Amino acid sequence: MLGTRTDDEQPVHLKPYGANVLLTGSSGSGKSTIATAILERLDEQQYQFCIIDPEGDYESFEGALVLGDPSRSPSVDAVMDLLEKPDQNAIVNLLGVGMADRPAFFEGLLPRLQELRARSGRPHWIVIDEAHHLLPTSWRPSSTTLPQELSGLMLITVHPDHVAPAVLSLIDTIVTVGEAPEQAIEAFSAALERSRDAGEPLEARPLASAPTRLENGEALIWSRSSGESPFRLRLAPPRGERGDPGRLDRVDPDLVWPGHIRVPDGGIGLGGGHASTARLKFRDGILAVLVAQ
Ligand SMILES: Nc1ncnc2c1ncn2[C@@H]1O[C@H](COP(=O)(O)OP(=O)(O)OP(=O)(O)O)[C@@H](O)[C@H]1O
Ligand SMILES: [Mg+2]
């Protein structure tokens, strides 16, 4: 279950496999957190996933093994060996792969994932965080990558308009969080219309709806095939927060230090000793949330 509609309190479910989902919204608006909540549920139902994790956002995810770390590039063979086992999920951490080399790494991994899919139907989900880096506008499907065969994709990006139109055209469900969610859907629609992908079977633009201001923990959802306007959804909380939705921060006092630090938007991962137990995130350049487990 993804959450509950705010208008009629009806539960909203995501198709557990075969769907193509875009998760978008402003920087730091909670995209990776929502993805984690969705994947926890898929894991509970034994669906297999492979997360491409350029920023180390999923390293503390319980139901999966992390391959690669800041000092070591993950090996495609190791990823595939792991995914051969139906009860294992893979987190492919790209912190050890230089920014410029990441698209090429992904280009090597994707056909192998598709090959396993063709053979076994798994992994059910290929989750690509920061998808605008790995499938940029300039990306062209290679002969081994037939985009129409790409399904079970969850693309996560702050810039849907910087993602390859061939991939955007496969997306049905768009989940947006944060400020100005309509703008994110608009950016998606405009990118599709700019593409020369004629014969597009799904709607590029949603029916008009009133401007939306989302509360904390809400998302705006649009299904292109539904013919409906986007609607507001109260998201089901991630596992760690279930039953305790009011508590935002769990702070380990050992990790608090005096003074202020300013860093670029987007956050940093904590390397070294605390990496598996704590994570700092920065919003608008200021330390906003400190989570320890
Ligand atoms: N509903 C929420 N309530 C309170 N804090 C939240 C909520 N959702 C996410 N956060 C916190 O906000 C921070 C940013 O969340 P997250 O990393 O999921 O955002 P993001 O959109 O993926 O960011 P980025 O654009 O940097 O990838 C995290 O520290 C997370 O714990
Ligand atoms: Mg993120």
Image (cartoon, grey):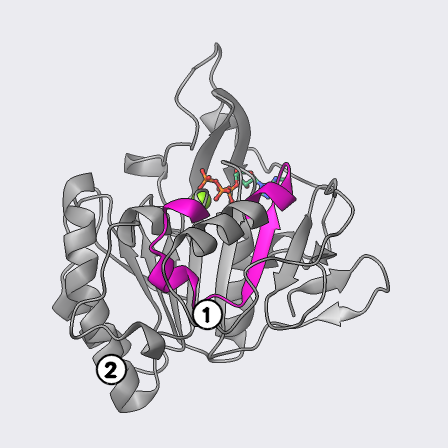
Q: Nearer the viewer, residue 141 or 191?
A: 191
Amino acid type at image mark 1: Glu
The residue stretch that appears in magenta = 160-184
- Structural distance between the alpha carbons of marks 2 and 1: 28 Å
Task: Assess whether mark 1 and mark 2 are in contact (beta carbons under 8 angstroms).
Answer: no
Q: What is the quadrant of the N terminus in the image? A: bottom right
| Residue depicted at x 47% and y 65% | 171
Look at 49% across and 12% down and name the residue there.
258
Could you say which disc has been placed on residue 200 in the image? Answer: 1
Q: What element carries label 2?
A: helix
- Say above or below: 184 vs 272: below
The reply to whether residue 131 is visible in this rendering is yes
> Where is residue 214, by image quadrant?
top right
Q: Which of 248 and 95 is in front in this view?
A: 95
Horizontal arrangement in the rendering, residue 226 relative to residue 213 (left or right): left
Reading the image, the residue beneath label 2 is 116
Q: Which of 45 and 204 is in front in this view?
A: 204
Residue 237 is labelled as none
Q: In the image, 184: left or right of 169?
A: right
